[in-house]
């Protein structure tokens, strides 16, 4: 049976012969009537795993469908900015304890319920990352949680002068234009203060104290 109807004997024989032949590509083209059938056309764009994304979507994902995650080091600057924006949004939700998407709640789920040291480690964390990704997608629809391939050749943790230790996207720094913007928004404006002189121990008093104690013994 197929779709509630019996499959014709000729079709069964054709499928059996196709399997016996090693599943060769089919050169037959069957027309599809898009006017009368429930067919939704979509454009599918396939990108190389390690290619830098130019903004084109890899696949027309459905709502809630698991997505192929990308290498963090292969994300473009606009993609990294969208990921950061989504994280800022769930950070801001920490003020709303009733919203389960807030970052603190997600962190507590991992802190109190994470599975480590046995066979549930991988499936539990897959489900956990899926839900975490869904929360981020509420604010940036097309993003995914990227992965960090620390085996790539640019990572040289034992020789930091010859390579990277962590991904550039993980580094906590401000661009010069953002620094100027933040300084300009300070009210009142910062002023230069004279450096405070460091406190110094009274060395003479300590010396005299030691000499007094030694003479007393």
Image (tube, helix red, strand yellow):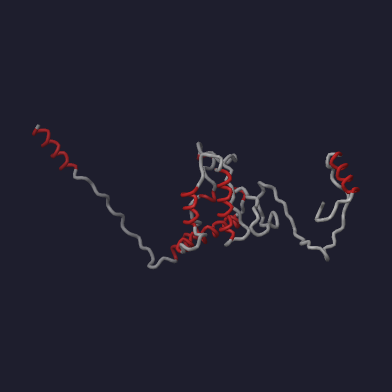
The spot of residue 189 in percent (x, y) is 39, 66
Q: Can the viewer see residue 192?
A: yes
Q: Residue furthest top?
A: 217
Q: Can the viewer see residue 177?
A: no
Residue at 19%, 42% (x, y): give it. Answer: 203
Taking depth in this image into account, of 111 and 69 the one nearest to the observer is 111
Taking depth in this image into account, of 165 and 129 the one nearest to the observer is 129
The spot of residue 117 in percent (x, y) is 51, 39
Q: Please give the count of numbered marks on the rendered protein.
A: 0
**Among the 4 quarters of the image, the one containing residue 13:** top right
User: Is 169 left, or right, of 202 in this rendering?
Assistant: right
Residue at 55%, 47% (x, y): give it. Answer: 125
Q: Residue furthest left?
A: 216
Taking depth in this image into account, of 149 and 136 the one nearest to the observer is 136
Task: Classify 17 as above or below 197.
Answer: above
The spot of residue 207 in percent (x, y) is 16, 39
């Amino acid at each position: 049976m197929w779709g509630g109807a019996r499959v014709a004997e000729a079709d069964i024989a054709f499928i059996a012969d196709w399997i016996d032949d090693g599943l060769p590509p089919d050169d037959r083209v069957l027309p599809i009537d898009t006017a009368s059938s429930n067919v939704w056309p979509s454009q599918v764009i396939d990108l190389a795993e390690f290619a830098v994304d130019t903004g084109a979507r890899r696949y027309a994902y459905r709502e809630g469908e698991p997505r192929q995650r990308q290498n963090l080091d292969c994300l473009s600057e606009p993609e990294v900015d969208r990921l950061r924006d989504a994280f800022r949004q769930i950070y801001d939700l920490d003020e709303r304890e009733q919203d389960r998407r807030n970052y603190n709640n997600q962190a507590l789920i991992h802190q109190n319920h994470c599975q480590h040291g046995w066979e549930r480690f991988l499936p539990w964390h897959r489900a956990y990352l899926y839900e975490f990704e869904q929360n981020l997608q509420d604010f940036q629809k097309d993003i995914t949680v990227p992965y960090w391939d620390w085996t790539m050749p640019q990572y040289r943790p034992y020789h930091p002068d010859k390579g990277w230790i962590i991904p550039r996207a993980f580094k906590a720094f401000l661009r010069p234009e953002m620094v100027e913007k933040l300084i300009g928004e300070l009210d009142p404006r910062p002023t230069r203060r004279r450096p405070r002189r460091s406190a110094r121990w009274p060395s003479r008093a300590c010396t005299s104290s030691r000499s007094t104690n030694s003479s007393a013994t």
